[in-house]
Amino acid sequence: MRQIEQRAVQAYREQFLEEPVLVASAPGRVNLIGEHTDYNGGFVLPCAIDKRVAVAVGHGDTQFYSADFQERCPLLEKRDGSWADYPSGIVWAMKERGFDIPSFQGAFAGDVPLGSGLSSSAAIEAATAIALDALFHLEMVKKDLAVLCQHAENAFVRVNSGIMDQYASLLCQAGTALLIDCRSLEAKPITLNLAGADLTLLICDTYVSRELSATGYNARREACERAAHTLGVRELRDAHLQDLEKLSGEERKRARHVITENSRVLEAVQALQRQDFDAFGQLMYASHRSLRDDYEVSTPELDAFVEIALHSSALGARLTGAGFGGCALALIRSEDAGALVLDVQHCFEARGFTRPEFFSFQPAVGAEFVT
Ligand code: GLA
């Protein structure tokens, strides 16, 4: 059992004075490339990080305990803005699907950084979903659980996210990234073999608050919908570069990002398949420029990280997740990661930015449970 799962089991014992029936956990995710394409019916390429949310569950009067917030919460009938929205949303969505969810209790523990764009919310949803599926023998497949988690996030928590985060948290496999076609929902693992090439993925958490991100995110989605409408296509997935001349202003820039980003994901997959990490890295840099200039979701901190990476030996770097703060990611030779960290720390200090946090990881496995 992982340490984080043991913490959830320990919290369960202390709170509910008995042994749980099972413990499940699900990871946060980082997106390698394919940003703001999921809600346009396009392609994404996330992988799971080795930080997870665990939940120990058993039968009891429905209530939740969070070891991180040291707080007990009842099952919520509607959202109240607390962490309990996420497990409550899953129960709500399962009942809506017609499943009988008898009372149960659960204790959570997690180490996915909160509010950093590493999908701590998808991790708590996915962990709850897989735990309840096992506890009540619902026998849903992971893809359906992911769709159910997204529905809970959209309709119960009322955050208008795409399918990427929940899909990644449930379906990723160790050592691979997951190519998701967000229209057909087909997903294919793509081997990364980073360790074999002495490469690592370095995440920089800029600690820039993502509070305003919901407004910006929704505005981007609306611009994409308007662009698709003007072009007479179902989603921007169906648009081509030559269509851009029929658009202007904001819609044109947003659409250009989505169209070029979808192509970059497919090229990136080909680069990975031939183990051409230099080409892959160049696509990461191009993705960042497009997110900065056309999609306008970067920040001075994220740009600074990518700029420093570009002038170091990093093969590629980009902001990852929705943007508006949060994390950036670099693909770099393992032996060079320490020097990049120092350069970024110096630059951030000199510019008066918040002190960033760094961690490296190897792509981890998606949601699973242990009895
Ligand atoms: C957030 C959303 C995802 C996706 C990304 C941007 O993480 O939850 O669905 O849209 O932003 O790629």
Image (spheres, rainbow, N blue to C red):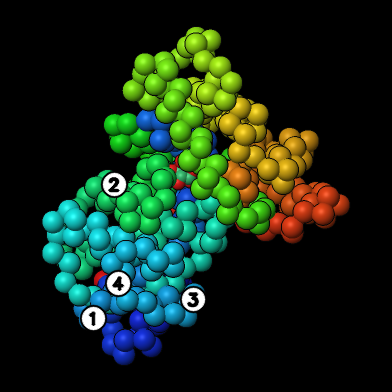
Going from the N terminus, do you reach mark 3 or mark 1 first? Answer: 1
Image quarter of residue 64: bottom left
- State the mark number for residue 75: 4
Q: Amino acid at mark 3?
A: Phe
Going from the N terminus, do you reach mark 4 or mark 3 first? Answer: 3
Please state if 96 lies on the left or on the right of 86 as rendered.
left
Can residue 218 be seen in the rendering of this structure? Answer: yes
Can residue 329 be seen in the rendering of this structure? Answer: no
> In front: 22, or 194?
22
Residues under labels 4 and 3: Cα distance?
A: 16 Å
Q: Which residue is mark 3?
A: 69
Instruction: From the top left corner, tell me how far across and down residue 274 is, in percent.
Output: 50, 27
Residues under labels 2 and 3: Cα distance?
A: 28 Å
Residue at the image point whose x is 61% and y is 45% from the top: 324
Provide the secondary structure element on which disc 3 rests: loop
Q: Nearer the viewer, mark 4 or mark 3?
A: 4
Residues under labels 4 and 2: Cα distance?
A: 21 Å
- State the mark number for residue 147: 2
Badge 4 density bin: few <14, some 14–19, many ≥20, Cα 10 Å: many
Q: Which residue is mark 1?
A: 61
Please state if 317 lies on the left or on the right of 144 as rendered.
right
Residue at the image point whose x is 32% and y is 64% from the top: 78
Going from the N terminus, do you reach mark 2 or mark 1 first? Answer: 1
Q: Amino acid at mark 4?
A: Leu
Q: Nearer the viewer, mark 1 or mark 4?
A: 4
Specify the quadrant that holds the N terminus: bottom left
Provide the secondary structure element on which disc 4 rests: loop
Q: Amino acid at mark 2?
A: Val
Q: Nearer the viewer, mark 4 or mark 2?
A: 4
